[in-house]
Amino acid sequence: MAAKGRIEIDAEHCKGCELCTTVCPQNVIKMSDWFNVKGYRPAALVDPAGECTGCAVCAVICPDAVITVYRTITGRTPAAALV
């Protein structure tokens, strides 16, 4: 079963603490090169190869809860088929 994921970061509320960048096992979260309205450089998903697994470690560590995780697991047999 392969997991594919993506995240959305609320850039206007991100304070740029960089905690998410330090815990991402796939290393697909980077700091933006622009500033939000509060003057912070927000985090951003940089994942052209689709390596994000949706593990949610970034969302758990985010002190401002600005990261939403979406995860899809492929190759799973539906429960109804197991009966």
Image (cartoon, rainbow, N blue to C red):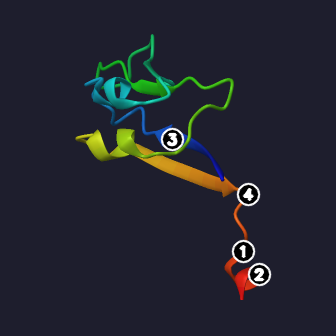
Element on which disc 2 rests: helix
Residue 81 image label: 2
The alpha-carbon separation of the residues under discs 1 and 4 comes to 9 Å
Of residue 52 and residue 12, the one placed in the foreground of this image is 52
Tell me whether the residue at label 1 lies in contact with that at label 2, contact meaning CB atoms closer than 8 angstroms. Answer: yes
Question: Which of the 4 image quarters holds residue 39?
Answer: top left
Sequence-wise, which precedes: disc 2 or disc 3?
3
Sequence-wise, which precedes: disc 3 or disc 1?
3
Name the residue that disc number 4 marks: 75
Image quarter of the C terminus: bottom right
* Amino acid on which disc 2 is placed: Ala
Query: Alpha-carbon neighbours of circle 4 within 10 Å: few (<14), some, or many (≥20)?
Result: few
Which residue corresponds to the image point at 63% horizontal and 54% vertical from the top-left?
A: 72
Name the residue that disc number 1 marks: 78
Name the residue that disc number 3 marks: 8
Which residue corresponds to the image point at 61% horizontal and 31% vertical from the top-left?
A: 51
Position of residue 62 in the picture relative to residue 25 (left or right):
left
The alpha-carbon separation of the residues under discs 3 and 4 comes to 24 Å
